[in-house]
Image (cartoon, rainbow, N blue to C red):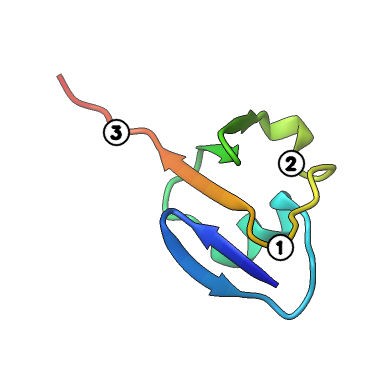
């Protein structure tokens, strides 16, 4: 299954949920925002959000500063 993650194409052997993908990728930031096909996916809905062929996923981290 082909996914586009933050602009880069990856191949997965099987479909998964957004939550499972995040566990696999282990983003460096403790808290992230997720967007699938231009739709924000709240953290409490990630387990229910199945990913499909050619889905475009953005994993956004928050940067502090002043």
x 75%, y 57%: residue: 52
Vertical side of 10 occupied by 17: above or below: above
Badge nearest the viewer, 2 or 3: 2
Residue holding disc 1:
53
Relative to 37, residue 9 above or below? below
Report how many numbered discs are placed on residues in the image.
Answer: 3
Residue 46 marker: 2
Callout 1–callout 2 Cβ contact below 8 Å: no
Residue drawn at x 26%, y 28% as measured from the top left: 64
- Report helix, strand or loop for mark 3: loop
Is 56 or 19 nearer to us in this picture?
Answer: 56
- The quadrant of the image that shows the C terminus is top left
Badge 3: few (under 14), some or many (20 or more) residues near its Cα, within 10 Å? few
Residue 9 marker: none
Q: Please state which of residues 48 and 8 is positioned toward the viewer in this rendering.
A: 8
Q: Is residue 19 above or below residue 23?
A: above
What is the quadrant of residue 11 in the picture? bottom right
In depth, the one of 38 and 35 nearer the eye is 38
- In the rendered image, residue 40, in percent from the top left (x then y), is placed at 60, 29
Numbered disc 2: secondary structure: loop
Which of disc 3 and disc 2 is earlier in sequence?
A: 2
Q: Residue 43 location, x and y as percent? A: 68, 33
Q: Alpha-carbon distance for marks 2 and 3?
A: 22 Å
- Between label 1 and label 2, give the one nearer the viewer: 1
> Which residue corresponds to mark 3?
63
């Amino acid at each position: 299954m082909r996914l586009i993650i933050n602009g880069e194409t990856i191949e997965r052997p099987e479909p998964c949920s957004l939550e499972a993908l995040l566990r696999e990728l282990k983003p460096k930031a403790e808290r992230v925002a997720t967007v699938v096909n231009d739709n924000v996916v709240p953290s409490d809905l990630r387990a229910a959000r199945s990913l499909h062929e050619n889905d475009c996923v953005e994993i956004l981290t928050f940067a502090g500063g002043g």
